[in-house]
Amino acid sequence: MESRAGHTPQAPAAAPPTPDWSVTANVLLGSEYIFRGISQTGGKPTVQGGFDVAHSGGFYAGTWASNISWLEDFGAYNRSSLEWDFYGGFKQNFGSSDWFWDVNQSGGGVLMDMGCHAFGWFRWMLGGNPVVKSVWATMDTVRHKGRTLGEDNAVCVVEFDGGVIGLAEDGWAKPGGMDDRIEVYGTTGVSFADLFRGNAAQTYSEEGYGYAAEKAGSTQGWTFTIFEEVFNQGYPHELQHFIECVREDKTPLVTGEDGRAVLEIIYAAYASARSGAKVPLPFHPKVSKPIDLWK
Protein backbone atom coordinates (compact mmCIF):
# COMPACT_ATOMS: atom_id res chain seq x y z
CA MET A 1 0.00 0.00 0.00
CA GLU A 2 1.17 3.49 -0.72
CA SER A 3 -0.22 6.85 0.30
CA ARG A 4 1.10 10.12 -1.05
CA ALA A 5 0.02 13.53 0.14
CA GLY A 6 1.57 16.93 -0.14
CA HIS A 7 1.08 20.65 -0.39
CA THR A 8 3.01 23.80 0.20
CA PRO A 9 1.84 27.20 1.39
CA GLN A 10 1.14 29.46 -1.54
CA ALA A 11 4.14 30.58 -3.56
CA PRO A 12 2.78 31.86 -6.90
CA ALA A 13 5.18 32.15 -9.78
CA ALA A 14 6.11 35.64 -10.89
CA ALA A 15 3.58 37.02 -13.37
CA PRO A 16 2.69 40.32 -15.00
CA PRO A 17 0.49 42.53 -12.80
CA THR A 18 -3.22 42.11 -13.36
CA PRO A 19 -5.95 44.74 -12.89
CA ASP A 20 -7.68 44.92 -9.52
CA TRP A 21 -11.08 44.59 -11.21
CA SER A 22 -12.14 42.16 -13.89
CA VAL A 23 -15.40 41.77 -15.81
CA THR A 24 -16.38 38.61 -17.69
CA ALA A 25 -19.49 37.73 -19.65
CA ASN A 26 -21.04 34.61 -21.14
CA VAL A 27 -23.76 33.83 -23.68
CA LEU A 28 -25.22 30.43 -24.54
CA LEU A 29 -27.68 29.26 -27.19
CA GLY A 30 -28.85 25.76 -26.36
CA SER A 31 -31.32 23.18 -27.57
CA GLU A 32 -32.98 22.94 -24.13
CA TYR A 33 -32.53 24.12 -20.52
CA ILE A 34 -32.49 21.11 -18.19
CA PHE A 35 -31.92 21.45 -14.44
CA ARG A 36 -31.59 18.35 -12.25
CA GLY A 37 -33.19 16.23 -14.92
CA ILE A 38 -36.23 18.49 -15.38
CA SER A 39 -36.74 20.60 -18.51
CA GLN A 40 -37.15 24.29 -17.71
CA THR A 41 -38.14 25.17 -21.29
CA GLY A 42 -40.55 22.36 -22.17
CA GLY A 43 -38.23 20.86 -24.75
CA LYS A 44 -37.74 24.20 -26.52
CA PRO A 45 -34.44 26.05 -27.16
CA THR A 46 -32.88 28.34 -24.57
CA VAL A 47 -30.92 31.57 -24.62
CA GLN A 48 -28.83 32.22 -21.52
CA GLY A 49 -26.30 34.82 -20.49
CA GLY A 50 -24.67 36.60 -17.62
CA PHE A 51 -21.71 38.61 -16.43
CA ASP A 52 -19.46 38.70 -13.39
CA VAL A 53 -17.46 41.43 -11.68
CA ALA A 54 -14.54 40.37 -9.47
CA HIS A 55 -11.90 42.13 -7.39
CA SER A 56 -8.41 40.78 -6.84
CA GLY A 57 -9.06 40.94 -3.09
CA GLY A 58 -11.60 38.12 -3.40
CA PHE A 59 -14.98 39.84 -3.63
CA TYR A 60 -17.20 39.01 -6.59
CA ALA A 61 -20.77 39.55 -7.82
CA GLY A 62 -22.71 38.53 -10.88
CA THR A 63 -26.02 37.93 -12.54
CA TRP A 64 -27.32 35.25 -14.89
CA ALA A 65 -30.59 34.87 -16.80
CA SER A 66 -32.38 32.34 -19.00
CA ASN A 67 -35.73 31.94 -20.67
CA ILE A 68 -38.00 29.38 -18.98
CA SER A 69 -41.49 28.04 -19.46
CA TRP A 70 -41.98 25.40 -16.77
CA LEU A 71 -44.18 27.50 -14.48
CA GLU A 72 -46.53 28.21 -17.35
CA ASP A 73 -46.26 24.62 -18.61
CA PHE A 74 -47.47 23.33 -15.23
CA GLY A 75 -50.21 25.96 -14.96
CA ALA A 76 -48.65 27.60 -11.92
CA TYR A 77 -48.31 31.04 -13.50
CA ASN A 78 -49.35 32.24 -16.92
CA ARG A 79 -46.78 35.00 -17.42
CA SER A 80 -43.49 33.39 -16.44
CA SER A 81 -40.79 33.45 -19.12
CA LEU A 82 -37.58 34.49 -17.33
CA GLU A 83 -35.27 33.13 -14.64
CA TRP A 84 -33.00 35.88 -13.33
CA ASP A 85 -30.38 35.06 -10.70
CA PHE A 86 -28.08 37.28 -8.65
CA TYR A 87 -25.13 36.12 -6.56
CA GLY A 88 -22.02 37.38 -4.85
CA GLY A 89 -19.47 36.42 -2.27
CA PHE A 90 -15.86 36.30 -1.20
CA LYS A 91 -13.27 33.65 -2.02
CA GLN A 92 -9.62 33.51 -1.14
CA ASN A 93 -6.82 31.13 -0.22
CA PHE A 94 -5.83 31.65 3.41
CA GLY A 95 -2.36 30.90 4.66
CA SER A 96 -1.68 28.66 7.64
CA SER A 97 -1.87 30.18 11.13
CA ASP A 98 1.30 30.81 13.14
CA TRP A 99 0.66 27.90 15.49
CA PHE A 100 0.77 25.56 12.50
CA TRP A 101 4.50 26.30 12.07
CA ASP A 102 5.37 26.35 15.79
CA VAL A 103 6.37 22.83 16.84
CA ASN A 104 5.83 23.75 20.48
CA GLN A 105 2.14 24.11 19.69
CA SER A 106 1.65 21.66 16.82
CA GLY A 107 3.92 18.91 18.15
CA GLY A 108 5.72 18.44 14.84
CA GLY A 109 5.64 19.09 11.11
CA VAL A 110 4.11 17.39 8.11
CA LEU A 111 4.06 14.00 9.83
CA MET A 112 1.61 15.37 12.41
CA ASP A 113 -0.38 17.26 9.79
CA MET A 114 -0.62 14.72 6.96
CA GLY A 115 1.16 11.52 7.95
CA CYS A 116 -1.54 10.82 10.52
CA HIS A 117 -4.09 10.46 7.70
CA ALA A 118 -1.91 7.98 5.81
CA PHE A 119 -1.40 5.85 8.91
CA GLY A 120 -5.09 5.98 9.74
CA TRP A 121 -5.90 4.90 6.19
CA PHE A 122 -3.44 1.98 6.41
CA ARG A 123 -5.23 0.77 9.54
CA TRP A 124 -8.67 1.13 7.94
CA MET A 125 -7.59 -0.80 4.84
CA LEU A 126 -6.30 -3.62 7.02
CA GLY A 127 -9.48 -4.09 9.01
CA GLY A 128 -9.19 -1.34 11.60
CA ASN A 129 -6.78 -2.78 14.14
CA PRO A 130 -3.80 -4.43 12.42
CA VAL A 131 -0.63 -5.34 14.30
CA VAL A 132 2.29 -3.03 13.47
CA LYS A 133 5.67 -4.73 13.66
CA SER A 134 8.01 -1.82 12.92
CA VAL A 135 8.34 1.73 11.56
CA TRP A 136 11.18 3.26 9.56
CA ALA A 137 11.30 6.91 8.51
CA THR A 138 13.47 9.64 7.04
CA MET A 139 12.58 13.32 7.09
CA ASP A 140 14.01 16.81 6.67
CA THR A 141 13.10 20.48 6.39
CA VAL A 142 13.80 21.15 2.73
CA ARG A 143 11.76 24.25 1.85
CA HIS A 144 10.66 26.09 4.98
CA LYS A 145 13.82 26.24 7.09
CA GLY A 146 13.27 29.91 7.83
CA ARG A 147 9.76 29.38 9.17
CA THR A 148 9.61 26.12 11.11
CA LEU A 149 11.78 23.69 13.04
CA GLY A 150 9.45 20.90 11.95
CA GLU A 151 9.93 18.56 9.02
CA ASP A 152 8.26 19.56 5.75
CA ASN A 153 9.01 16.32 3.92
CA ALA A 154 8.85 12.76 5.23
CA VAL A 155 8.91 9.20 3.94
CA CYS A 156 7.73 6.43 6.29
CA VAL A 157 7.60 2.66 5.91
CA VAL A 158 5.20 0.81 8.21
CA GLU A 159 5.58 -2.96 8.46
CA PHE A 160 2.41 -4.83 9.47
CA ASP A 161 1.97 -8.38 10.67
CA GLY A 162 1.26 -10.71 7.76
CA GLY A 163 3.79 -9.20 5.37
CA VAL A 164 1.91 -6.00 4.43
CA ILE A 165 4.05 -2.89 3.87
CA GLY A 166 2.64 0.64 3.98
CA LEU A 167 4.66 3.47 2.40
CA ALA A 168 3.62 7.05 3.25
CA GLU A 169 5.11 10.07 1.47
CA ASP A 170 4.08 13.41 2.96
CA GLY A 171 5.30 16.89 2.17
CA TRP A 172 4.67 20.62 2.39
CA ALA A 173 7.45 21.16 -0.15
CA LYS A 174 5.47 20.48 -3.33
CA PRO A 175 4.07 23.55 -5.12
CA GLY A 176 0.85 23.55 -7.12
CA GLY A 177 -1.78 22.73 -4.51
CA MET A 178 -2.91 19.64 -2.66
CA ASP A 179 -1.92 16.28 -4.10
CA ASP A 180 -3.47 13.24 -2.42
CA ARG A 181 -3.02 9.88 -4.12
CA ILE A 182 -3.37 6.27 -3.04
CA GLU A 183 -1.90 3.16 -4.63
CA VAL A 184 -2.64 -0.41 -3.55
CA TYR A 185 -0.65 -3.36 -4.87
CA GLY A 186 -1.78 -6.92 -4.19
CA THR A 187 -0.80 -10.36 -5.40
CA THR A 188 -3.78 -10.50 -7.76
CA GLY A 189 -4.53 -6.86 -8.55
CA VAL A 190 -3.84 -3.17 -8.08
CA SER A 191 -5.93 -0.07 -7.35
CA PHE A 192 -5.21 3.65 -7.78
CA ALA A 193 -7.10 6.70 -6.49
CA ASP A 194 -6.41 10.41 -6.94
CA LEU A 195 -8.55 12.20 -4.39
CA PHE A 196 -7.97 15.73 -5.70
CA ARG A 197 -7.36 15.38 -9.43
CA GLY A 198 -9.43 12.30 -10.06
CA ASN A 199 -12.62 14.25 -10.76
CA ALA A 200 -11.15 17.73 -11.23
CA ALA A 201 -11.52 19.81 -14.37
CA GLN A 202 -8.23 20.37 -16.20
CA THR A 203 -8.25 24.12 -16.78
CA TYR A 204 -5.95 26.44 -18.70
CA SER A 205 -6.08 30.19 -18.08
CA GLU A 206 -3.66 32.84 -19.31
CA GLU A 207 -4.83 35.43 -16.77
CA GLY A 208 -5.75 33.15 -13.88
CA TYR A 209 -9.06 32.90 -12.05
CA GLY A 210 -10.41 32.93 -8.51
CA TYR A 211 -9.97 29.48 -6.99
CA ALA A 212 -8.79 26.06 -8.18
CA ALA A 213 -8.17 23.94 -5.09
CA GLU A 214 -6.79 24.07 -1.58
CA LYS A 215 -3.26 25.57 -1.44
CA ALA A 216 -3.16 25.89 -5.23
CA GLY A 217 -1.75 29.43 -5.20
CA SER A 218 -1.58 30.80 -8.74
CA THR A 219 -4.28 29.76 -11.20
CA GLN A 220 -2.39 30.89 -14.28
CA GLY A 221 -1.50 28.22 -16.83
CA TRP A 222 -2.73 24.66 -16.37
CA THR A 223 -4.57 23.90 -13.12
CA PHE A 224 -6.88 21.25 -11.72
CA THR A 225 -10.16 22.91 -10.73
CA ILE A 226 -11.65 20.64 -8.09
CA PHE A 227 -15.36 19.84 -8.18
CA GLU A 228 -17.39 19.84 -4.94
CA GLU A 229 -14.21 20.14 -2.84
CA VAL A 230 -15.86 20.10 0.58
CA PHE A 231 -17.94 17.04 -0.32
CA ASN A 232 -14.97 15.18 -1.79
CA GLN A 233 -12.96 15.86 1.35
CA GLY A 234 -15.69 14.18 3.38
CA TYR A 235 -16.37 17.11 5.73
CA PRO A 236 -20.20 16.97 5.55
CA HIS A 237 -20.17 13.24 6.31
CA GLU A 238 -17.66 13.69 9.12
CA LEU A 239 -19.65 16.47 10.76
CA GLN A 240 -22.93 14.59 10.37
CA HIS A 241 -21.46 11.53 12.07
CA PHE A 242 -20.02 13.66 14.88
CA ILE A 243 -23.40 15.27 15.54
CA GLU A 244 -25.11 11.86 15.52
CA CYS A 245 -22.60 10.58 18.08
CA VAL A 246 -23.38 13.53 20.36
CA ARG A 247 -27.16 13.57 19.89
CA GLU A 248 -27.84 9.84 19.60
CA ASP A 249 -24.94 8.46 21.66
CA LYS A 250 -23.60 6.49 18.71
CA THR A 251 -20.18 4.87 18.86
CA PRO A 252 -17.71 6.85 16.73
CA LEU A 253 -16.43 5.06 13.65
CA VAL A 254 -12.97 6.31 14.60
CA THR A 255 -12.29 6.18 18.33
CA GLY A 256 -9.72 7.62 20.69
CA GLU A 257 -7.97 4.25 20.64
CA ASP A 258 -7.56 4.58 16.88
CA GLY A 259 -6.00 8.00 17.35
CA ARG A 260 -3.68 6.64 20.01
CA ALA A 261 -2.53 3.84 17.68
CA VAL A 262 -1.77 6.35 14.92
CA LEU A 263 0.20 8.52 17.36
CA GLU A 264 2.27 5.50 18.35
CA ILE A 265 3.28 5.08 14.70
CA ILE A 266 4.12 8.80 14.47
CA TYR A 267 6.27 8.64 17.63
CA ALA A 268 8.11 5.63 16.21
CA ALA A 269 8.65 7.46 12.89
CA TYR A 270 10.30 10.43 14.62
CA ALA A 271 12.52 8.10 16.64
CA SER A 272 13.50 6.18 13.50
CA ALA A 273 14.40 9.40 11.67
CA ARG A 274 16.89 10.18 14.43
CA SER A 275 18.46 6.72 14.70
CA GLY A 276 18.20 5.66 11.05
CA ALA A 277 16.97 2.23 12.17
CA LYS A 278 13.63 0.46 12.31
CA VAL A 279 11.71 1.03 15.52
CA PRO A 280 9.75 -2.01 16.69
CA LEU A 281 6.30 -1.63 18.21
CA PRO A 282 4.94 -1.42 20.90
CA PHE A 283 6.71 1.91 21.43
CA HIS A 284 5.82 4.17 24.38
CA PRO A 285 8.43 6.89 24.92
CA LYS A 286 8.10 9.72 27.45
CA VAL A 287 8.54 13.10 25.73
CA SER A 288 6.68 16.39 25.86
CA LYS A 289 5.93 16.37 22.11
CA PRO A 290 6.45 13.86 19.27
CA ILE A 291 9.13 15.84 17.38
CA ASP A 292 11.40 15.74 20.45
CA LEU A 293 12.21 12.17 19.40
CA TRP A 294 13.78 13.52 16.21
CA LYS A 295 15.35 16.85 17.31
Image (cartoon, rainbow, N blue to C red):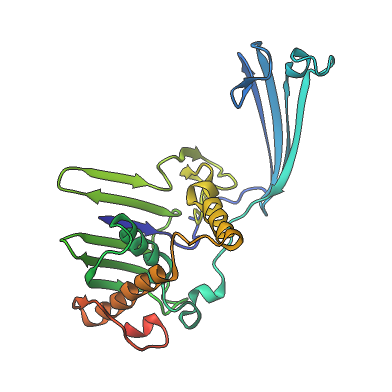
Q: Quadrant of the C terminus?
A: bottom left
Residue 132 image position (x, y, % from top left) = 24, 69
Taking the image as shown, residue 269 lies to the left or right of residue 86, namely: left
In the picture provided, is 285 more to the left or to the right than 75? Answer: left
The one of 186 and 261 positioned closer to us in this rendering: 261
Residue 14: % across, % down: 50, 55
Quarter containing the N terminus: bottom left
Q: Position of residue 43 (x, y in %)?
A: 64, 11
Q: Residue at the location (33% across, 78% down)? A: 267
Left or right for 235, reference 187 = right
Q: Is residue 216 visible?
A: yes
Q: Nearer the viewer, residue 135 or 237?
A: 237
- In the depicted structure, whether residue 60 falls above or below residue 164: above
Q: Residue at x 42, y 57 (%)?
A: 175
Q: Is residue 68 above or below residue 123?
A: above
Name, please, the residue furthest toward the front.
Answer: 249
In this rendering, is residue 53 above or below 105? Answer: above
Q: Position of residue 67 (x, y in %)?
A: 73, 19
Which residue is pictured at 61% across the width and 16% down the height? 30
Residue 268 placement, left or right of 172: left
Q: Is residue 20 visible?
A: no
